[in-house]
Image: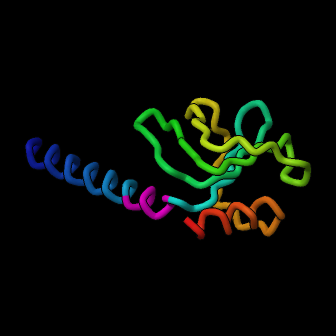
Amino acid sequence: KQWYQRRVRGILNMTSALAGADFLKGLLNKLLRIEITDGRIMVGSFLCTDRDRNLIIGGTAEYWNTVEGEPRLLGLVMIPGKHIVSISVDTSDSGVASLLKAYHKAK
């Protein structure tokens, strides 16, 4: 009975890992809005991640505390997972977001 329970748990863990991988694949090249611990907000196209939850985003615009101000354009950025506060898919129609969406669609 214990062997069977361990096998079922192993299959369930594998299934949830595959679901997580599918979720991340669905986010590839989507415009993400990432808030980090020092209050900055990064908006860029999701390119990859690793098992330490580090993210790499491209075509990145950096904002301080709000997306309303003037952004600083950074390009390719690696954000350490330990500094990420929140991640969301950016659907705003701000000028820079629209510009970045157009840039990434043209690729």
Residue appearing at x 59%, y 55% in the figure: 45
The front one of 106 and 22 is 106
Q: Look at the image and name its color scheme.
A: rainbow
Q: Quadrant of residue 32?
A: bottom right
Q: Quadrant of residue 107?
A: bottom right
Give the tally of numbered discs.
0
Name the residue at the right extreme. 69
Residue appearing at x 75%, y 62% in the figure: 97
Q: Quadrant of residue 88?
A: bottom right
Q: Above or below — where is 8 with respect to 82?
A: below
Residue 3 is left or right of residue 13, and the answer is left
Residue 39 is left or right of residue 9, and the answer is right
Q: Above or below — where is 66 with respect to 103?
A: above
Residue appearing at x 70%, y 51% in the figure: 43
Is residue 25 a member of the stretch shown in magenta? yes
The magenta region covers 22-28
